[in-house]
């Protein structure tokens, strides 16, 4: 396996050791090791079917590994479900974003984490005020907070998904992103990439799945490559190039 020549002395905030996942006898992942360090953007790369999304789901509690161990900030943890992952400061933003299309922006941002006034009533005024603050923080403008999210652009929808995961409730320390720029235009993609860099500046570590190597080289610190469910390469972004990454993905090195 290709790997950086130096050994990183930092302690990982998230580590997977020998993760294997089988579905009815089909091996989707086989003994995958992965480390995510503090204030790092780690690109998780590979062709379709390489096992990227399966690995993310194992780390986020959506799947249980068939074998292997997961460590969060050095402690061995069994992440049995997404709620457990969230309690450990691990948030996941999937490609489909899991938004409620017929609800408005505040209702989506505060889904599952509503602000409550005395006597148990929803604090709609505070949620709208916080929604404006969150969207401003993400540099996103919407025509109206009351419009349903199915009428938003792809970039706006991603901003709502990121805002809900990162800025509502407890701030996570780790964010897992599955193809966040898929289907976005150049301007919205660039804005989203800047948001990912902003998360790093705020002390949040990110695992980023992407097929767009231009985006990977724009924001990532390090890249790991999966092929056929196995980890086949690891590179420091500053010490590699697109050709090396593609060769690892295709298995020609």
Image: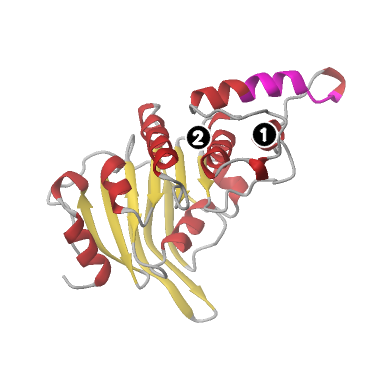
Q: Is residue 126 above or below residue 51?
A: above
Q: Can residue 33 be seen at all in this image of the molecule?
A: yes
Q: Is residue 249 above or below residue 5?
A: below
For label 1, count other residues whose C-alpha is less than 10 Å away and answer few (under 14), some (14-19) or many (20+).
many
Give the residue at mark 2. 172
Q: SS for tag 1?
A: helix
Horizontally, residue 40 falls left or right of residue 233, namely: right
The residue depicted at 80 percent of the width and 26 percent of the height is 122
Q: Which residues are magenta?
A: 120-131
**Quick one: label 1 or label 2, which is nearer the N terminus?**
1
The residue depicted at 17 percent of the width and 47 percent of the height is 7
x, y (%) of residue 222? 26, 47
Which quadrant would residue 130 be assigned to in this image? top right
Quadrant in which the C terminus appears: bottom left
Horizontally, residue 195 falls left or right of residue 95, namely: left
x, y (%) of residue 86? 57, 42
Q: SS for tag 2?
A: loop
Q: Is residue 211 above or below residue 150?
A: below
Closer to the observer: label 1 or label 2? 1
Question: Is disc 1 in contact with disc 2, using a CB cutoff of under 8 Å?
Answer: no
Which quadrant would residue 135 be assigned to in this image? top right
The residue depicted at 20 percent of the width and 56 percent of the height is 242
Q: Is residue 118 above or below residue 216?
A: above
Quadrant in which the N terminus appears: bottom left
């Amino acid at each position: 396996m290709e790997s950086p020549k130096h050994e990183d002395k930092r302690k990982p905030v998230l580590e997977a050791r020998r993760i294997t996942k089988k579905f009815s006898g089909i091996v989707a992942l086989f003994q995958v090791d992965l480390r995510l360090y503090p204030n790092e953007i780690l690109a998780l790369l590979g062709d379709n079917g390489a096992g990227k999304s399966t690995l993310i789901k194992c780390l986020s509690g959506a799947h249980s590994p068939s074998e292997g161990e997961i460590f969060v900030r050095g402690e061995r943890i069994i992440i049995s479900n997404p709620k457990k992952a969230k309690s450990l400061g691990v948030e996941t933003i999937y490609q489909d974003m899991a938004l409620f299309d017929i609800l408005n922006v505040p209702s989506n941002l505060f889904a599952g984490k509503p602000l409550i006034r005395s006597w148990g009533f929803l604090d709609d005024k505070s949620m709208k005020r916080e929604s404006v603050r969150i969207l401003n923080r993400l540099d996103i403008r919407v025509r109206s907070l009351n419009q349903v999210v199915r009428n938003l652009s792809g970039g706006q929808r991603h901003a709502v998904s990121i805002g809900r995961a990162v800025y509502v409730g407890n701030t996570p320390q780790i964010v897992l992103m599955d193809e966040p720029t898929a289907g976005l235009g150049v301007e919205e993609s660039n804005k989203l990439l800047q948001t990912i860099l902003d998360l790093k500046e705020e002390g949040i570590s990110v695992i980023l799945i992407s097929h767009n190597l231009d985006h990977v080289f724009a924001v990532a610190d390090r890249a790991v490559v999966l092929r056929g469910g196995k980890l086949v390469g690891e590179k420091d972004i500053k010490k590699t190039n697109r050709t090396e990454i593609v060769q690892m993905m295709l298995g020609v090195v």
